[in-house]
Image: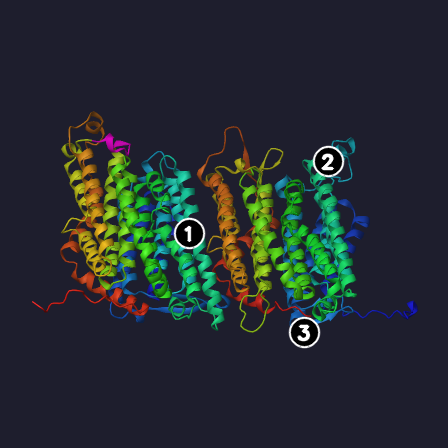
C-alpha cells in the first residue's frame, strides 16, 4: 500500500549537477535584472551575465571531469555519463555562440536583431514610440539561458517525465524568441505561432508515447523499459511498445527537423531573428539528437530491430527532400533550413547504424553523431554570424542574388562563408568531411552499407545547392540597382566567425584527438 | 621529410602568390614552380633504388586508422616528374592570362590556384594512405573548379559545375569504398588505412568485388571512360587551355594511377574478375573518343576526345594485367601528359589569335605562321603515336603485352590507331593547309613568340627524347609494374610460341 505521507526527501548530488544549477540561477537573476535594473545598462549586464553563466557552467563540467565516474543522479532521474558530458559541453559551446549572436548590435546600427517592444502590435503607435526611445528586448538572454537549461536536462534525462518537462522547458522560450524579430515582424510572429502550434502537437505525440511506454513497462525510468523489453514477458503488450516507440520518435524527430516532421523548419528559420535561427538550428538539434540516442539506445535498444528500419527510412527521406527542395531556394535562410533537414538525415544515418562503444570499436554511433554535431554547429553559428553582417536597405541581405560578386567586393567574408559552405557540403580538408566520414563509417559498421550509398548520392545533390551560393559569390556580379554592404560586426560576432572558421579548418586537418575523446565518452549508463 | 617539403612547397607558394598582385605575383609563382621542379626531379632521382629511405609514416587520425604516409615508388616518381614539369610550362604559356578581357580572376589568382593544385596532386601521387589519398584527390577539385569557373570562356560556370558534380559523385563513391574497407579493417583488429595494410586484408570475394566497383568507379570518372566522360569535353571547351592541360595532363592521370596503386594492390582478384568487362569498356571508350574526335569541330573538344581515346588505351593496358602492357600504360601516362599538353597549348595559341576554336575558322595557317604550324604538326604526330614519338613506344608495349592474353581485343586497338591518324591529319589539313583566308591572314599572321616557343619546346624535346631513348625510363617503369603484379600475385602468361621445334 502506498502511503503518500512517506515521501522521502530527494537526494541531490550538488557538485555534478552544478552546471544545471548555475544555468537556472543565471536565468532567474536575468529575470530579476529585467525587473530592477535601469534600461540603459541592461543589455551590457544581461549579455555579460549570460556569458559568465555559461562559461561557469562549462568550467563546472570540466572540473567535474577530473574525477568522473558515471552515475545516476537526483534519484535516478539524470544519467551522468560520457554522452551526457559530451552533449553538455557541445550545448554550452553552442549556447556561447548563441549569446554572442544575440548580443550583436553593431551590424544593426546600434540596435539588436530583436524587436524594440515585442508586445507592441506591429505598426502601432506603441511600437513607433518604443523604436523612437531605442528600447530593446533584453529578456532574450534569460530566455536563452532557460532554453539552454532545458536542453542540458533533455540530453541527460533518464526519466520519461523529466524528459517531457525538459522538452517543454527548452521549447517554450524558443517559441517566444522566434516571434521577436525587429524587422518583418509579422513574418516573425507567424513563424513563432507556427512553431508553437506544431511544436505543441509534437509534444502531445511525445507525451502520448511516454504513456504507452509506461503502459508497456510499468516504469518511468529508461532502464525499466529496457528491462521490460528484455524480459519478453509482455508479448501481449508488444503493440504498446511499438506505439510508444513510434510516438516518441515523432516527437523527437520533429525537434530534429527530419522529414516528414520538417514542415516548420523553413518558415521558422526564415521568420525568426537570425541570431535565434543560428542558436536554435544547432542547439535544438543537438539536444534532441542526444535525447533520441539515449531513449532509443538505452530504453529501446532491445527493440532495435523494430526502429532501425524506421530511422533508415526517415534518414533517406530527410536527405532526399531536404537536398532536392533546397535546390530551388533563393533565400539563404530558407536554404540553410533545408540544409538543416539534410543534415538531420545524415545524423540519422549514424543513429541507424547503432554501433555501441566497446572493445574493438573506434568510431561508435554516439561518437560519430557528437563529432558531426560539433562540426555542423561551429559552421552553422559562423554562417549565421556572417549572414547578420551582410546587409542591404531594410535589414539583412538574405537573398542569394544579394551575395553575387561578394568574392570581389569583400573576399574575406566571401572566403570564410565559402569555407563554411564547403564544410556543410562535406568537401575534404574541412571539418564537415570528417563528420560525414565518421557518420558513414558508423553506419557501415552497423551493417547499413546501402544507407551509406544513398547518403553519398544525396551528398552530391546537396553539394549542388551549396555550390550555387559559392558560384554567386565568386563567379557572378551584383545585379544593377541592388546595394549590399558588409557591415563590420562587433567582437561578439567576429569571435563566433573566427572560432567557427578555425574549428572548421583544424577539425578538418587534425580530427584524431577529438574523435578519440568523443568515442571514449560514448558509453551510456544503463 | 623531403617528400613533405616537395608537397608543401607549391602550397606554400600558392599562399604567397595569392597575397601578391600583377607581374610580381607571376614571377614569384614561376619561381615556386621552378623550385618545385628542381626539388621534384631531385627527389625522384634520389628515390630510384632507395624509395624506402624517403618514405614517412606517422599516425594521423587514430580512430579512423589514418596515417600521414608519403612514399615515392617508381610509378609515383614518374607522375611527380610529369606534374612538376607541366606546371611551369603552363605558367609560361598562360603568362598573359590577365590580358584577356573575358576572365574574372587575376593572374595572381590563376597562378596561386595552379600551385595549390600542384601541391595537392603531388600529395595524391605520394600518398601511402587511402584517406590521405582521398582527401588530396577530392581537394584538387577545389582549385580546378575555380580555375575553370573564373578563367574560362563561354559556358564556364556550367562547365565548372558539371565538372565538380561529376568528380564529386565519383569521389564520394570512392568514399563508400573507403568506409567499407575501414569496416573490414576494424573486423580484422586495429584499423589501418595504409594502402599496404589494406592489400593484406582477407576479404570475402563478394565484399571485395563490391568495394572494388565503388573504388574503380571514382577512377573511371576521373580517367574518363565512355559513359562517364561527358564532363571532359564541356570543361575543355570552356576552360583556358592551361587549365585543360593541368586537368587532363595531371589530374586525370589520378584515375589510371589509382587503378594501379589502389585497385590492383587491394583487390587483385576483383581486377581479374572485372577484366573482361573493363577491357571491352576500354575498347569502346577508345573507339568512341576517336570517332567523336573525327567529328568534332571545336578544336578544344577535339583534343579532349583524343584524350578519352588515349585513356581507353591506358586502361586497357592496365587490365590486360601483364608486365609489358602495364609498363606500356604507365609510360603512356607520362607521354600522354606531355603530348596532350603540347596539343592543348598549341591549340590555345591558335584560339587566342583567332578568337575562335572552330576548326573551320582556320585555313592555311602554315603559310602565315610556319613555326606555329610546325609545333602543331609535331604535337599532332605525337597524339597519333608516330614511331619515333614516345607515345608510339607505349602504345606498342601495351599491344605487345596484351596480345599474349587477349589477341582478339588487342586487334580492336589497331582500329583506334588508324582512327587517331585520321583525326589528327584531318585537323591539320583543315586548319593549316589550303588557301589562307582573310581572317586568318589578319589575326594569325604573327607567329609564335619566344615565350610561346619556350613553353612548348621542352615538351616536344621530351616527347622525341623518350621516343628515341625510352630505355632508362622503361627500366624504372618495368621495375614498378613487376612490383605491382608480384604484390597482386599475378603472373604473366607463358608465351605460346616457343623458340624450338624449327
Residue labelled with disc 2 = A131
Marks 3 and 2: which is nearer the front? 3
Which chain is indicated by disc 2? A
The colour scheme used here is rainbow
For the C terminus of chain A, give its image quadrant: bottom right
Q: Residue at x 76, y 36 (%)?
A: A130
Quadrant of residue B121 within the rendered picture? bottom left
Dot 2: element: helix
Task: Report the span colored magenta.
Answer: B354-362
Residue labelled with disc 1 = B170
Q: CA distance from mark 3 to mark 2?
A: 52 Å
Residue labelled with disc 3 = A69
Tell me residue A70's x, y (percent): 68, 72
Tell me residue B292's x, y (percent): 28, 40
Marks 1 and 2: which is nearer the front? 1
Observer able to see residue A337? yes
Amino acid at each position: 500500500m502506498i502511503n503518500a505521507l512517506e515521501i522521502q526527501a530527494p537526494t541531490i548530488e550538488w557538485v555534478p549537477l552544478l552546471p544545471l544549477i548555475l544555468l537556472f540561477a543565471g536565468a532567474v537573476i536575468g529575470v530579476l535584472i529585467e525587473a530592477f535594473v535601469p534600461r540603459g545598462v541592461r543589455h551590457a549586464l544581461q549579455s555579460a551575465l549570460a556569458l559568465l553563466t555559461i562559461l561557469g557552467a562549462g568550467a563546472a563540467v570540466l572540473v567535474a571531469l577530473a574525477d568522473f565516474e558515471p552515475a545516476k543522479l537526483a534519484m535516478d532521474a539524470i544519467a551522468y555519463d560520457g554522452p551526457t558530458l559530451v552533449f553538455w559541453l557541445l550545448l554550452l559551446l553552442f549556447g556561447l555562440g548563441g549569446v554572442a549572436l544575440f548580443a550583436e548590435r553593431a551590424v544593426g546600427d546600434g540596435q539588436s536583431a530583436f524587436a524594440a517592444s515585442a508586445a507592441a502590435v506591429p505598426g502601432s503607435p506603441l511600437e513607433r514610440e518604443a523604436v523612437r526611445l531605442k528600447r530593446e528586448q533584453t529578456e532574450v538572454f534569460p530566455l536563452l539561458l532557460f532554453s539552454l537549461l532545458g536542453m542540458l536536462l533533455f540530453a541527460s534525462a533518464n526519466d520519461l517525465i523529466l524528459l517531457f518537462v525538459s522538452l517543454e522547458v527548452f521549447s517554450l522560450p524558443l517559441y517566444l524568441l522566434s516571434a521577436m524579430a525587429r524587422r518583418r515582424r509579422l513574418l516573425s510572429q507567424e513563424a513563432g505561432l507556427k512553431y508553437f502550434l506544431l511544436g505543441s502537437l509534437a509534444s502531445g505525440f511525445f507525451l502520448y508515447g511516454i504513456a504507452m511506454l509506461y503502459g508497456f513497462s510499468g516504469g518511468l525510468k529508461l532502464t525499466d523499459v529496457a528491462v521490460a523489453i528484455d524480459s519478453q514477458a509482455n508479448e501481449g503488450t508488444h503493440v504498446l511498445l511499438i506505439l510508444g516507440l513510434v510516438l516518441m520518435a515523432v516527437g523527437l524527430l520533429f525537434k530534429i527537423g527530419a522529414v516528414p516532421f520538417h514542415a516548420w523548419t523553413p518558415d521558422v528559420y526564415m521568420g525568426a531573428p537570425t541570431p535565434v535561427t543560428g542558436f536554435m538550428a544547432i542547439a535544438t538539434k543537438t539536444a534532441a539528437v542526444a535525447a533520441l540516442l539515449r531513449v532509443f539506445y538505452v530504453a529501446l535498444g532491445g527493440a532495435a530491430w523494430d526502429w532501425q528500419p524506421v530511422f533508415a527510412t526517415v534518414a533517406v527521406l530527410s536527405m532526399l527532400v531536404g537536398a532536392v527542395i533546397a535546390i530551388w531556394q533563393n533565400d539563404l535562410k530558407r536554404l540553410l533550413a533545408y540544409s538543416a533537414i539534410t543534415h538531420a538525415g545524415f545524423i540519422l544515418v549514424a543513429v541507424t547504424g547503432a554501433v555501441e562503444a566497446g572493445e574493438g570499436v573506434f568510431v561508435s554511433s554516439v561518437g560519430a553523431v557528437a563529432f558531426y554535431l560539433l562540426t555542423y554547429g561551429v559552421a552553422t553559428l559562423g554562417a549565421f554570424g556572417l549572414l547578420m553582417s551582410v546587409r542591404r536597405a531594410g535589414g539583412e541581405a538574405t537573398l542569394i542574388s544579394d551575395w553575387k560578386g561578394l568574392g570581389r567586393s569583400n573576399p574575406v567574408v566571401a572566403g570564410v562563408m565559402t569555407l563554411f559552405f564547403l564544410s556543410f557540403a562535406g568537401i575534404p580538408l574541412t571539418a564537415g568531411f570528417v563528420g560525414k566520414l565518421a557518420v558513414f563509417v558508423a553506419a557501415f559498421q552497423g551493417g547499413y552499407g546501402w544507407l551509406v550509398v544513398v547518403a553519398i548520392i544525396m551528398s552530391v545533390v546537396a553539394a549542388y545547392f551549396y555550390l550555387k551560393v559559392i558560384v554567386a559569390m565568386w563567379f557572378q556580379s551584383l545585379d544593377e540597382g541592388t546595394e549590399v554592404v558588409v557591415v563590420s560586426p562587433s567582437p561578439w560576432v567576429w569571435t563566433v566567425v573566427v572560432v567557427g572558421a578555425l574549428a572548421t579548418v583544424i577539425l578538418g586537418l587534425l580530427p584524431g584527438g577529438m574523435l578519440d575523446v568523443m568515442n571514449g565518452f560514448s558509453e551510456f549508463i544503463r | 621529410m623531403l617528400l613533405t617539403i616537395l608537397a608543401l612547397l607549391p602550397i606554400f607558394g600558392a599562399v604567397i602568390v595569392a597575397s601578391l598582385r600583377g607581374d610580381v605575383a607571376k614571377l614569384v609563382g614561376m619561381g615556386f614552380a621552378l623550385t618545385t621542379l628542381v626539388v621534384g626531379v631531385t627527389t625522384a632521382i634520389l628515390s630510384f633504388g632507395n624509395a624506402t629511405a624517403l618514405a614517412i609514416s606517422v599516425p594521423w587520425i587514430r580512430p579512423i586508422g589514418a596515417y600521414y604516409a608519403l612514399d615515392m615508388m617508381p610509378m609515383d616518381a614518374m607522375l611527380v616528374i610529369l606534374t612538376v614539369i607541366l606546371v611551369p610550362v603552363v605558367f609560361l604559356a598562360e603568362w598573359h592570362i590577365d590580358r584577356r578581357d573575358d576572365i574574372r580572376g587575376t593572374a595572381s589568382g590563376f597562378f596561386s590556384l595552379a600551385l595549390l593544385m600542384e601541391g595537392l596532386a603531388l600529395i595524391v601521387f605520394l600518398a601511402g594512405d587511402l584517406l590521405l589519398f582521398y582527401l588530396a584527390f577530392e581537394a584538387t577539385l577545389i582549385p580546378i573548379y575555380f580555375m575553370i569557373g573564373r578563367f574560362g570562356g563561354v559556358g564556364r560556370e556550367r562547365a565548372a559545375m558539371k565538372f565538380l558534380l561529376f568528380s564529386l559523385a565519383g569521389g564520394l563513391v570512392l568514399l563508400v569504398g573507403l568506409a567499407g574497407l575501414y569496416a573490414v579493417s576494424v573486423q580484422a583488429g586495429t584499423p589501418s588505412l595504409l594502402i599496404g595494410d589494406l592489400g593484406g586484408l582477407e576479404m570475402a570475394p563478394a565484399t571485395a568485388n563490391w568495394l572494388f566497383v565503388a573504388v574503380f568507379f571514382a577512377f573511371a570518372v576521373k580517367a574518363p571512360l565512355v559513359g562517364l566522360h561527358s564532363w571532359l569535353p564541356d570543361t575543355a571547351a570552356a576552360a583556358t587551355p592551361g587549365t585543360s592541360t593541368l586537368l587532363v595532363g595531371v589530374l586525370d592521370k589520378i584515375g589510371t594511377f589509382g587503378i594501379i596503386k589502389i585497385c590492383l594492390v587491394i583487390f587483385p582478384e576483383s581486377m581479374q574478375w572485372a577484366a573482361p568487362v573493363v577491357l571491352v569498356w576500354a575498347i569502346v571508350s577508345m573507339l568512341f573518343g576517336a570517332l567523336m574526335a573525327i567529328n568534332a569541330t571545336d578544336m578544344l573538344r577535339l583534343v579532349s576526345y583524343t584524350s578519352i581515346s588515349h585513356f581507353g588505351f591506358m586502361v586497357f593496358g592496365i587490365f590486360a594485367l601483364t608486365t609489358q602492357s602495364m609498363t606500356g600504360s604507365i609510360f603512356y601516362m607520362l607521354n600522354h601528359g606531355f603530348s596532350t599538353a603540347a596539343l592543348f597549348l598549341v591549340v590555345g595559341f591558335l584560339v587566342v589569335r583567332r578568337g575562335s576554336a572552330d576548326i573551320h575558322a582556320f585555313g592555311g595557317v602554315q603559310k602565315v605562321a610556319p613555326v606555329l604550324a610546325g609545333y602543331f604538326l609535331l604535337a599532332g604526330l605525337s597524339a597519333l603515336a608516330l614511331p619515333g614519338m614516345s607515345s608510339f613506344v607505349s602504345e606498342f608495349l601495351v599491344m605487345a603485352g596484351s596480345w599474349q592474353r587477349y589477341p582478339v581485343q588487342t586487334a580492336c586497338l589497331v582500329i583506334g590507331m588508324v582512327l587517331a591518324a585520321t583525326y589528327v591529319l584531318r585537323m591539320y589539313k583543315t586548319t593549316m593547309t589550303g588557301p589562307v583566308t582573310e581572317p586568318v591572314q589578319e589575326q594569325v599572321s604573327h607567329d609564335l613568340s619566344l615565350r610561346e616557343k619556350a613553353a612548348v619546346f621542352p615538351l616536344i624535346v621530351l616527347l622525341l627524347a623518350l621516343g628515341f631513348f625510352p630505355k632508362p625510363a622503361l627500366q624504372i617503369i618495368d621495375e614498378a609494374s613487376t612490383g605491382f603484379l608480384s604484390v597482386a600475385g599475378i603472373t604473366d602468361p607463358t608465351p605460346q610460341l616457343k623458340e624450338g621445334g624449327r
